[in-house]
Image (cartoon, rainbow, N blue to C red):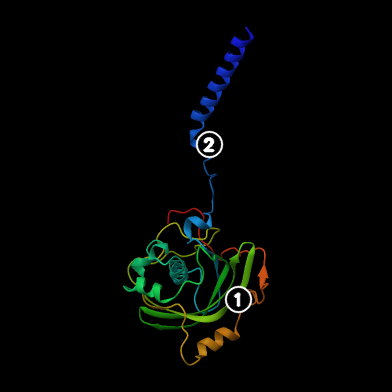
Amino acid sequence: MRTHRRHRVLALLAAAVTALTLGGCGNTPDDPAPRAVPMPSEDIPSGFDVTFRWLPNGVFDVSGQEGTFVRAFVESFELANAGRSVQWGYRGFEEAAPSNIAQMIEVYPAETSATHPGVGSAFFTGLRRVDDADWTRIVLCRYGYRSVQVADDEWSGRLDAPRPVEIDFRRGGVVPPSNIRGTARTPHGDVFGDWHVTRYDFAAIYPHTTADERACAAGTPAEVPTHLPAQATSPQPPMTPIPGWWASSPL
């Protein structure tokens, strides 16, 4: 009698477990929880946990059409360079880039890798611009910091040397959207419009020091860290992206 009752209880428990498993297959414990903001591994190359912060000034409107286009291209290039493929750029990046974009990415060696990942933030601010009809050149200053993993539980703190970045682009056709800001690290769609980059120099460093190099070195914004621990057991965390991208949008 007890054996029969025990078998019946076990059968009921098994049926209940089966019902829970089948009924909850859309949201099992193994399923990832929904996220409003993508995790870094989904949208950035392995080993490159770097956020982008754009510091506004009078050179160009970070929130305007120019700002959307410039920061989308610059961020895309950094991601593509780190991942060694144009596919890491935002949607529309390859179409908005010069035809030799794949070769351009290979020219600049990646500073981090899956073996030695880097964590930190890159800062950009406008230095000067040149306008000629539908053509524009914007010179940026790039700053940054990162912690690079050199061994288990050992991270090396590094400050990126200030450097100019030059981007030439032409307008035409569909314009990029404006006033995009939010908590997401990457956009959800093509934000380039029909504008096109004709020339891009990720590190405009020349044999003879230029006025742009000196200006970038002399004008480090207060928001940029000036000191990191040389060695630490954990990385200096990245800052939140500014202005960021919409966490949910039709783009």
Q: Estimate the x, y position of residue 202 in percent, counting from the top left.
A: 45, 77
Cβ atoms under marks 1 and 2 closer than 8 Å: no
Q: In this view, does 39 lie to the left or right of 88?
A: right
Can residue 194 be seen? no
The residue located at (50%, 66%) in the rendering is 113
The residue located at (53%, 21%) in the rendering is 15
Q: In this view, does 41 lie to the left or right of 131?
A: right
Quadrant assignment, res 156: bottom right
Which element is circle 1 on? strand
Which element is circle 2 on? loop
Distance between the alpha carbons at the discs numbered 1 and 2: 43 Å
Residue with the mark numbered 2: 28
- Mark earlier in primary sequence (1, 2): 2
Q: Is residue 251 above or below residue 137?
A: above
Q: Look at label 1 and name its amino acid.
A: Leu
Can residue 200 be seen? yes
Q: In this view, does 51 lie to the left or right of 202?
A: right
Residue with the mark numbered 1: 159
Q: Which residue lies furthest to the bottom in this view?
A: 208
- Name the one closer to the observer, 107 or 200: 107
- Name the one closer to the observer, 45 or 63: 45
The residue located at (53%, 40%) in the rendering is 30
Q: Is residue 216 above or below residue 99?
A: below
Q: Is residue 197 above or below residue 152?
A: below
Q: Look at label 2 and name its amino acid.
A: Thr
